[in-house]
Amino acid sequence: MSSLIARICTFLAAGLLGAEPAGPAATMEKTSLVDSLDSGWVASPGLSISFVTGLDGQGKALGVRLRQSGRMDTKPRNLKPAVLRISVRVQGSGRRDRLFAILQDAYGRNQLVPFGFTDFKDVRTLNADTATILQLVRLEPKGLMFFGFYVEKAQGAESSIVIDTLEITNGLPYIFPEEPFGIR
């Protein structure tokens, strides 16, 4: 029993301290938000979405006009277990609008995970750290579900952003030592 507790503590400590998984390097899955995630995007009132040319000049991206805070949903997508980070390429609004990913954890609870502020006018990659979201049920990896984005609009006039390529960085399962930290 103490061995199981020690393994769980090791897993939690590694995840909370941002340790990289054991073994080969993490894998990255890159996908277009429009082409691969279904074109069935739905925006809440106060947001309007359109499909624009991708930020790299190829494919399509999601153009979002913000009149108030709201969410953009698409067909739910299962993400492989051990998601370390989700990244998106964004052309900012130049205002303090804040972008979040809408995820569901292994227990079915919705989570808003922040990418950050869009207070820039150029194109940048924003990252959402998912290491603290539960992706295990009874030590069985279940993964996460991606539902879309939530945008918290800054005070003031209307603004717009463009959201492009979604990158998902997965780690490999942690390898637990037989006697972590010398606990027996």
Image (cartoon, helix red, strand yellow):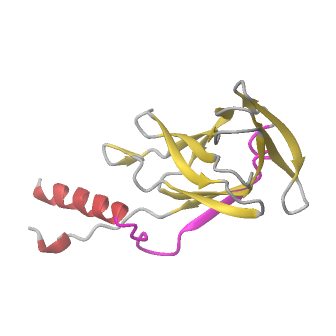
Report the residue at 71% width, 64% height from top.
124
Direction front: furthest residue? 156
Image quadrant where residue 69 sits: top right
Report the residue at 33% width, 65% height from top.
14
Up the image or down, 156 lies above or below 8; here it is above
Position of 62 with respect to 181 (left or right) is right
Q: Does the magenta stretch include residue 178?
A: no
Q: Position of residue 77 (x, y in %)?
A: 63, 40
Quadrant of the rendering where the C terminus is positioned: bottom left
Direction top: furthest residue? 45
Q: How many labels does the image show?
A: 0
Up the image or down, 105 lies above or below 162; here it is above
Q: Position of residue 78 (x, y in %)?
A: 58, 42
Position of 10 with respect to 2 (left or right) is right
Up the image or down, 100 lies above or below 2; here it is above
Q: Where is residue 96 in the image (x, y as percent from the top left)?
A: 63, 50
Up the image or down, 130 lies above or below 64; here it is below
Closer-to-camera residue (131/162) = 162
Report the residue at 76% width, 33% height from top.
41
Classified by dominant secondary structure, the portion drawn in magenta counts as: loop
Q: Where is residue 68 in the image (x, y as percent from the top left)?
A: 68, 32
Q: Is residue 20 magenta?
A: yes
Closer-to-camera residue (42/162) = 162
- Give the magenta range: 17-38
Position of 131 with respect to 123 (left or right) is left
Closer-to-camera residue (67/171) = 67
